[in-house]
Image: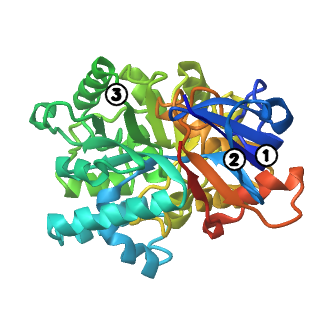
Amino acid sequence: MKQVLHRAPWLATGSYAPDLPALISNGAVLMANGIIQAVGPWPSLREKTAQVVEHEGCVLTPGLVNCHTHLELAWLASEAANHPMPPDQGSMTAWIRELLEKRGINPPLAVIMAAGRSTLDRMRDSGTILVADIGNAPASAAIGADHSTRVLFLHEMLGRDNPGLVPAGLACTPHAPYSTDPELIRTLKERARSAGQLFSIHVAESADEVQFLKAGTGPMRAFLMERGAWTPSNPVPGKGAISYLDQLQVLDDHTLCVHCVHLDKAELDLLARRQAKVCLCPGSNRYLGVGRAPVMEFLKRGLLPGLGTDSLASNVSLSLWDEMRTLRADWPELDPAVVFAMATSGGSQALGQADVYGLLAPGRTARFLAVPLPEMLVDGEILSYLTTAGANLRPQWVEG
């Protein structure tokens, strides 16, 4: 068994747990057979019989984990880039209406596939190792096939879609509580449980959604009626999104709630009791003007969220370095170690992949990053730099 020992001035382990420090000075990672064997200070590992590879001027980190994106919308990238703010900022329903109009152009499948694949290539080049990709067309699963960045594809369903129409073996997930029939939500959750698959759902992204779920009023009501997706004879839950999902008995430690911007204290407590997973998309939330997710409240309750980028229809970048920078700007009081953990171990936990990704730790994949650092950074500045430099970072893959 050939062993290789990678040494660097710093290791940012991705940890937010007492048993593994978030930052190790003069550290080393021992790998063999594609698996990390040991991690620690260089003096404790230097006697190992192994080839030594030096990474001068770098910090070694886990690959980044993107918990939520829509690669099939990558062909709309120019729309977000050319319009930094939507015409009706803060109105989620207005943006959805515009998105549906743009998607009505319906470009050839080859165009959608090529744009998605090219975008995934750029995500890999920026250091992303694992992605949860949500698509409305089963064919979109091919975007991430055989890519060096692992893609967990989820076919998104809404309205009264029939799960039986989806090809066997394809993981399915509902769009959102306001847009998906409750029986379909239950059916998809049971299907995910049986198959051991991820169950991800958009939750409380906008005030419009919450107003509709609680009272059946507001812009979302008018939008759904326009689409023929709701009539006044249909009951509304009369409660917030998290409480509604719990009523449907689909909220548990294998449920990933994406966005979670508009939650009250009772729903935050409920999330914690059910040990549900959370994914925050700060860049998309800022672009759409829907508000900031209450990240400090999640942390107070022992919930470490993962990070997602959402799509290029609502974000000008799918770089998780940019997401970390946005989160730090939105919440200056956040500990940089927590923010970095959200982009690594928090994401791997959210996607049920913590035994493989998210940490520089024994048993995890020996595919990780070497990130060049400016000269003269000291220990208190490393994680701050990683979480604020944004897409200016140029990581290199270390392949085990």
Q: Are the residues flagged by discs 1 and 3 in contact, CB closer than 8 Å?
A: no
In this picture, is 309 found above or below 312? above
Residue closest to the eye, 72 or 185: 72
CB of mark 1 within 8 Å of CB of mark 2? yes
Q: Which residue lies most toward the left here? A: 165
- Mark on residue 339? 2
Q: Earlier in the sequence, mark 3 or mark 2?
A: 3
Of the residues shown, which amino acid type is indicated by label 3? Gln
Above or below, 366 against 87 in this view is above
> What crowding class fits label 2: few (fewer than 14 Cα within 10 Å), some (14-19), or many (20 or more)?
many
Amino acid identity at mark 2: Val
Residue at the limit of the structure toward the bottom, as seen here: 82
Pointer 1 residue = 335
Q: Residue at x 28, y 34 (%)?
A: 235
From the viewer's perspective, is 271 left or right of 240? right
Disc 3: which residue: 197
Query: Badge 1: few (under 14), some or many (20 or more) residues near its Cα, within 10 Å?
Result: few
Residue 185 position (above or below residue 342): above
